[in-house]
């Protein structure tokens, strides 16, 4: 005799199906951000090591580094444009199709960078093409994170959104390890001339393979229940951006300012410190990349710990603790990094990236929780990427200027001030752990 609809057999089958569906969604949110951030960090590492001499052959190494960091910052300016563009369609037509489109834009831009000839080959057209593709990277990543976070949190059980929202936050750690690990391997295998001639292009071109994997995974997922419910209730708005700024401007601003500490910790620790360590402290490329790969493991460790704590104690207490530690950590930069000691520099990198994980993990749940379903993709994405403009776009450039004029103590002060800005924003926020996403 067949089981009735209310029988334990049917219920257990339904539970198993739900668990399987959530596993696919979690993996899709993770793999997409891992690939997108791999693409983004490939450029960040190349900017610190080779973009300057290949595309901006100034006589001064400082001028080369500054020019490379300007192109690095372009993507952060483009990211809010991507969040507005993809957020509009994400709130209008759905999370799934929009995430597929953002991955395509990012992957195509990254792969093409690997084929752009250098300044020696085509002159001034080289940096122009580089900047155009860098803007494409920014637009693609601008649409990625908000959708990935929503994919995870809108499927999550109400009391575990911090944990589910952690999986997109693991993407940056894995993407960074993959990109830096590949650059590390190339630095070991190739001579300096080979690396500058063609070796640096390999990580960009390999992006095409990773994007194909990400598209395969994402094309197999379903739309989120929260968005489906919004369609059924006819809650979608015609222009989400207008509704966002008319009705949710304050949480958007607070969310953006709260993100500043995450960006500053990460890009000062990786892009600026890598450039400074190789050029000023005379570390080899491979040794400093190895130190960064070691340190980012602690960022990956901190991410699930912080996500669990944010479900247990709330988003604000975890963020307040992590940001306060980040303010203090700025004072450690000068004595640890300027020592030139491998253990002490590694200690600083580990500390900063661990704190990055602590402050970054709760954002996967917190930013979506600030907004209603009808503007959630747009709101979370705009807040996240506006924070990128404030915390990351100019951070390596400013840090390079500060180090040249006042030394590493000034750069450490910059980290502390950026963290203090985020602390004020979090203190002004409401707790969102118990907010309903439906």
Image: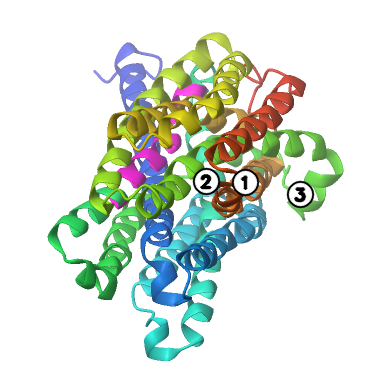
Circle 3 residue? 237
| Horizontal side of residue 54 vs 370, given as left or right | left
**Residue occupying the far left of the picture:** 189
Specify few, some or many for label 2: CA neighbours under 10 Å numbering under 14, 14-19, or 20 or more.
Answer: many
Q: Are marks 2 and 1 in contact (CB under 8 Å)?
A: yes
x, y (%) of residue 119?
A: 42, 83
Q: Earlier in the sequence, mark 2 or mark 1?
A: 2
Q: Is residue 400 above or below residue 62?
A: above
| Closer to the eye: label 3 or 2 | 2
Circle 1 residue? 381
If the image is split into quadrants, where does the C terminus sit?
Answer: top right
Q: Earlier in the sequence, mark 1 or mark 3?
A: 3
> Which secondary structure is most common in the magenta stretch?
helix
x, y (%) of residue 121?
A: 37, 89
- The span from disc 3 to disc 2 (Cα, nearest Å) is 21 Å
* Residue 300 in view in this figure: no
Circle 2 residue? 145
Specify few, some or many for label 3: CA neighbours under 10 Å numbering under 14, 14-19, or 20 or more.
Answer: some
- The span from disc 1 to disc 3 (Cα, nearest Å) is 17 Å
Looking at the rendered structure, the secondary structure element under dot 1 is helix
Q: Is residue 236 above or below residue 369?
A: below
| Horizontal side of residue 4 vs 367, given as left or right | left
Is residue 87 or residue 347 the one in the foreground?
347
Q: Are marks 1 and 3 in contact (CB under 8 Å)?
A: no
Picture residue at 69% right of the left edge, 36% below the top: 257
Picture residue at 57% right of the left edge, 50% below the top: 94
- The span from disc 2 to disc 1 (Cα, nearest Å) is 7 Å
Q: Which residues are magenta?
A: 162-179
x, y (%) of residue 181?
A: 25, 48
Looking at the rendered structure, the secondary structure element under dot 3 is loop
């Amino acid at each position: 005799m067949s089981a009735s609809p209310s029988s334990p057999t049917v219920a257990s089958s339904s539970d198993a199906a739900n668990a399987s569906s959530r596993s696919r969604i979690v993996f899709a949110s993770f793999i997409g951000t891992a690939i997108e951030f791999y693409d983004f960090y490939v450029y960040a590492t190349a900017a610190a090591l080779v973009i300057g001499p290949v595309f901006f052959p100034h006589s001064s190494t400082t001028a080369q580094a500054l020019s490379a960091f300007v192109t690095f910052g372009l993507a952060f300016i483009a990211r809010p444009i991507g969040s507005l563009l993809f957020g509009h369609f994400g709130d209008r037509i759905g999370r799934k199709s929009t995430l597929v489109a953002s991955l395509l834009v990012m992957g195509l831009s990254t792969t093409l960078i690997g084929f752009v000839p250098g300044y020696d080959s085509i002159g001034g057209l080289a940096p122009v093409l580089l900047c155009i593709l860098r803007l494409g990277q920014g637009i693609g990543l601008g649409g990625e994170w908000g959708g990935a976070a929503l994919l995870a949190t809108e499927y999550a059980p109400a009391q575990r959104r911090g944990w589910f929202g952690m999986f997109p936050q693991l993407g940056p750690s894995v993407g960074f390890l993959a990109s830096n690990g590949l650059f590390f391997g190339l630095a070991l295998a190739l001579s300096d001339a080979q690396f500058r001639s063609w070796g640096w292009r390999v990580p960009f071109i390999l992006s095409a393979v990773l994007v194909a994997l990400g598209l395969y995974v994402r094309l197999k997922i379903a739309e989120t229940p929260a968005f489906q419910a919004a369609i059924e209730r006819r809650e979608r708005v015609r222009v989400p951006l207008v509704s966002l700024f008319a009705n949710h401007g304050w949480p958007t601003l607070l969310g953006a300012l709260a993100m500043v500490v995450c960006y500053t910790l990460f890009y000062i620790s990786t892009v600026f410190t890598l450039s400074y360590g190789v050029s000023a402290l005379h570390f080899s490329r491979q040794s400093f990349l190895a130190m960064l790969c070691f340190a980012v493991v602690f960022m990956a460790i901190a991410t699930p710990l912080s996500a669990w704590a944010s479900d247990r104690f709330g988003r604000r207490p975890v963020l307040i603790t992590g940001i306060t530690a980040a303010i203090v950590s700025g004072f450690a930069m000068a004595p640890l990094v300027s020592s030139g000691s491998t253990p002490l520099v590694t200690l600083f990198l580990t500390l900063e990236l661990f704190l990055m994980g602590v402050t970054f993990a709760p954002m996967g749940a917190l930013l979506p929780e600030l907004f209603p379903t009808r503007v959630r993709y747009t709101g979370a994405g705009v807040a996240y990427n506006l924070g990128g403009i404030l915390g990351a776009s100019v951070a390596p450039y400013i840090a390079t200027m500060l180090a040249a004029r006042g030394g590493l103590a000034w750069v450490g002060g910059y980290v502390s001030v950026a963290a203090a800005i985020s602390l004020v924003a979090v203190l002004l926020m409401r707790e969102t752990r118990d907010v309903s996403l439906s």
